[in-house]
Image (tube, helix red, strand yellow):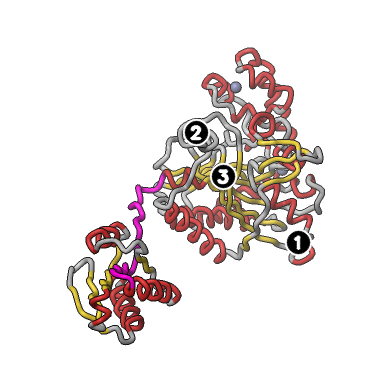
Amino acid sequence: MKKITLIKGFKDILPDDSPAWRRIESIARDVFACFGFREIRVPIMEKTELFKRSIGETTDIVEKEMYTFRDRDDELLTLRPEATASVIRAYIEHNMLSENPIAKLYTIGPMFRRERPQKGRFRQFHQLDAEVFGDEQPQTDAEVIFMLFHFLHRAGLTQLAVEINSLGCKACRPKFSEAVVAYLKDVQNALCPDCQRRMNTNPLRVFDCKVENCGSIIAKAPQILAYLCGSCQNHFTAVKSYLADLKVPCSVNPMMVRGLDYYTRTAFEVKSGALGAQNAVAGGGRYDGLVSFLGGPEVTGIGFAVGLERLLASLPQAEQAKYQTDIFIAALGDRAQKTGFSLTNELRRAGISAETDYGNKSLKSQMKRADKLNSSFTLILGDKEIDEKQAQLRNMKTKDQQALSLDNLQEKLISIILNSNECRDG
Ligand SMILES: [Zn+2]
Ligand SMILES: [Zn+2]
């Protein structure tokens, strides 16, 4: 039969790699809980409309990268390309504002984008996403950035640098947009075809263009910080000062501009020295207009997303996780196999990781398997040992061997294993 392979751009996370994933997720849960965040789990699929409205019709994600299909009843559905829209949809749908004026939520899971396949980019990738609704104070911006920074630091990322900018508000941002459009009109012909198109659909997206020439044109464009109104200026100054209080290394990047109208005030990215210059591990910002834009109440919002593949790729190479088994029971002969079967499963019930072999193989081949499973102890149990009412316990590291009477064997094994684990951990 022809074998069936993975979908292009998708990836299996194999048993050797999953401990690194679990570790990151568990650090995130610990850190976020300290900051009062609670987990929400939202579906991986939503009505296409949700992403079109939240991410924007003119973005690359919506134009080119979404996995969208028609369901059997003709409804257009999309595999989520990011999590914020779903979290907001749930926040509105479950009327969370009525429970609490401030909601802090996080979610972890797979996202889907049909990007051009390239090294380190996957079409199913994973993000950790955190959002705060209902607090517009600059302390909240600083706190969210601090939490992200602290999490990445605890995860083991080095040379972390935070870049921030302010994108203004409904009052001041339009003036900046106008100035950018006026500037771009003069240099229009030098822009790449994509940017020429963006000029008419969404001019601020020119700031995201990766084409070199566009980059040097945009470097001379008007900068948002010169257009901020008084209250946006105060907010930005306060955010920077709270970040300084928390000793977060932070620099202003006036070129960080998000193309959509509901992005307001603080925008930020975190980069790690371990990655190339373009590769931010995480990014986020304020979106004070988005909740109401999606049909919800007038509630402010701020959040971030961390790319877990990028995060893991930029950690120092973790030791590959091998099998760890507390005990292997090498049972030889029919009666020993029967005893071994119960003993193995009773040990597991008691919280000990135990393995055995049901094939009645030779002692040599069973010892080989015990080595493969990286087991700390092997219990050798043959019909002969059962007749003599004792089994041999071998410590696989020291190679010491001791005879154990079969009376209360299970309790003895548990106590020996737990004692040796204490020595190992201590
Ligand atoms: Zn403003
Ligand atoms: Zn361009």
Circles 3 and 1 in contact, beta carbons < 8 Å: no
Most foreground residue, 230 or 115: 115
Which of the image's four quarters has the C terminus?
Answer: bottom left
Most foreground residue, 220 or 136: 136
Residue at image position (35%, 83%) is: 411
Q: Where does the image place residue 422, in percent across and percent down from the top left?
A: 31, 75
Circle 3 or circle 1, nearest the eye: 1
Q: Which residue is mark 1?
A: 96
Spatial separation of the CA atoms under disc 3 and disc 1:
25 Å
Left or right of 28, for residue 100: right
Q: Relative to 75, say whether 145 is above or below.
A: below
Q: Relative to 94, say whether 220 is above or below.
A: above
Is 274 magenta? The answer is no
Within 10 Å of disc 2 (Cα), the crowding (few <14, some 14-19, many 20+) is: few
Within 10 Å of disc 3 (Cα), the crowding (few <14, some 14-19, many 20+) is: many
Q: Where does the image place residue 73, in percent across and percent down from the top left?
A: 81, 41
> Which numbered tag is attached to residue 283?
3
Which structural element holds mark 3?
strand
Q: Which residue is mark 2?
A: 2
Q: Relative to 192, say whether 204 is above or below.
A: below
Ligand 1: image quarter: top right
Ligand 2 neighbours mark 2 (CB distance < 8 Å): no
Q: Where does the image place residue 126, in percent across and percent down from the top left?
A: 55, 46
Q: Relative to 2, say whether 344 is above or below.
A: below
Within 10 Å of disc 1 (Cα), the crowding (few <14, some 14-19, many 20+) is: some
Q: Looking at the picture, which amino acid does disc 1 mark? A: Met
Ligand 2 neighbours mark 3 (CB distance < 8 Å): no
Is 323 magenta? The answer is yes
Q: Looking at the picture, which amino acid does disc 2 mark? A: Lys
Tell me which numbered mark, 3 or 1, is placed earlier along the sequence. Answer: 1
Which structural element holds mark 1?
helix
Magenta-drawn segment: 314-334
